[in-house]
Image: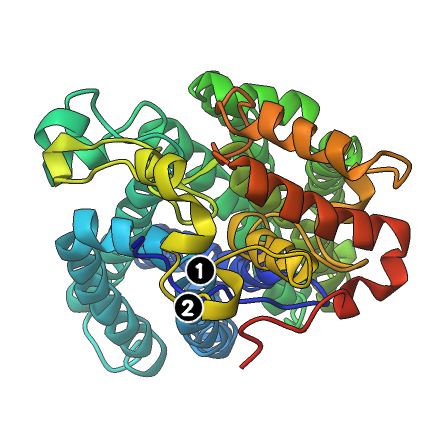
Amino acid sequence: MLGLFPSWLDPVVGSGWIVGLIATIHVLFSHTSVGAAIFFAYLTNHAHRHNKPELLEFIRRYGLFLLVFSYVLGSITGPGIWFATTVASPRGISALIHSFVWMWATEWVFFVIEVVGVYMLVYLATKLDVKTHTRIAVIFGLTSYTTMLVIVGILSFMMWPGMPEWSDTGGVLNAFFGPNTFAQLGMRTAFMFAITAVVGGIVAGSFKDQEQKKLIGRKLAILGIVSTLIGAAMLQWYLATLPETAEVVLQNRLPEHFPIALMTAVGGSLAYFVLTLVQPRALVSGVAAVMTVVILVFGLWPEEVARESIRKPWVAGQYVYSNQVVGRDVPGMGVKSEIPALEAHGFLKGHVFLPEHLRNVTDDNRVEAGRALALTACSNCHSLSTTGMRPLHRYFAGTHSESDVAQYLQAALSGGNTLYMPQIPLNDVEARALAAFIQSISATPATAAAAAPVLAKE
């Protein structure tokens, strides 16, 4: 029996989009907090050295804003990611925990220090001597950036495991420092400063004193312009570190509007920063809030969706497939591929949580068994209804015979020759069952959700 968990089916948007929506919003909160922490360390030193109390007031107001914007909302969406990814990709999360449990523990320790630091900066700024206040600001910035470093290493492993020897020897450092770890860190660092500058405009726009607003707006604009330009360059470095499969998906499987959306976000951000630099009166809280939404929709969302897509067919370490099947041996972790077991016994006989009456395909249950296969093997990336991401029915015109569809499925999936799809070694019986289900939803897509009883809907 395979150690597969029950599948989480959301028939409206799909589990992938739910995870993506939560993660994208969380990235906005987390990147703003990390960028602001480092920016605060610089501003605190500058304010004390040059006697600029207005900068300390900006830090206090921005920090107070972050307590809700980043540390309350971010602390809600953070556990939201854990919950959503655990039910959507339990084996993917398990793979990450087995490799990085102490890394995550370290990140949480630094996060606690970060939260304490922002409270101290906000509520004790006027009650501390200059030296202590400056030290707190620096510690706050460094600990915040450490959390970013740890998470980026884990995200890099999800794309491409660290050193080549990791597969044979294991080891957290071998897993952590991958080909694109520092490229991704540089890209995210640059763009987190750009996000910090945009969100900071919401706070700076509320200043009544025009000289104060001009001073703060100038620093935010310069920070935004420099970081946006550096971020665009870092993105090219990051793309150059991607594995071959990621490049194929990037070129062939992502919507055409993604590059346009990213260019819109970068160009719009630059235009906004230049405008606020030359015309400080343009720094208005409402406009800055609109720009934050623009970056979220046209910048962060496409980037996060692209990052999730280009690591396909893997979900973690290039050994756990997106459908939770272990597709490769990892001797260093004591992990064995499950492909031979699937080839010998199939999905239906090996899935622990499958209802007994679906383990053997008959004429009476063929469509329902096919739906169980689609739910297990396909639903992590494909919607089984007419909505959500990559609806399965769109890939088949409904004019082919069941035999044609079955032959296509076996040819495309059984050998693992499709770079962006998991290897799914369907036997003849399972291929015909899956084809029967696909035929049923391709012929009448509007009834996809009712094609068979909902499996594991509880």
Percent across and percent down for residue 62 are 49, 69
SS under mark 1: helix
Percent across and percent down for residue 17 are 63, 58
298 shown above or below 75: above
- Counting other residues with Cα less than 10 Å from the Cα at mark 2, is it few (<14), some (14-19), or many (20 or more)? some
| Residue where numbered disc 1 is placed | 30
- Image point (59%, 47%), residue name: 381
SS under mark 2: helix
- Image point (35%, 50%), residue name: 42
The three-letter code of the residue at mark 1 reads: Ser
- Counting other residues with Cα less than 10 Å from the Cα at mark 1, is it few (<14), some (14-19), or many (20 or more)? many
The one of 26 and 93 positioned closer to us in this rendering: 93
- Image point (32%, 23%), residue name: 179
The reply to whether discs 1 and 2 touch (Cβ–Cβ < 8 Å) is: yes
Alpha carbon of mark 1 to alpha carbon of mark 2: how far?
Answer: 9 Å
Q: Quadrant of residue 125?
A: bottom left
Which label belongs to residue 447?
A: none
Q: Is residue 224 visible?
A: no
Mark count: 2
The one of 203 and 360 positioned closer to us in this rendering: 360
The three-letter code of the residue at mark 2 reads: Gly
The one of 117 and 125 positioned closer to us in this rendering: 117
The tag earlier along the polypeptide, 1 or 2, is: 1
Q: Quadrant of residue 41?
A: bottom left
Which label belongs to residue 78?
A: 2
Q: Which numbered disc, 1 or 2, marks the residue closer to the eye?
A: 2
- Image point (32%, 49%), residue name: 151
In the image: residue 386, left or right of residue 40: right
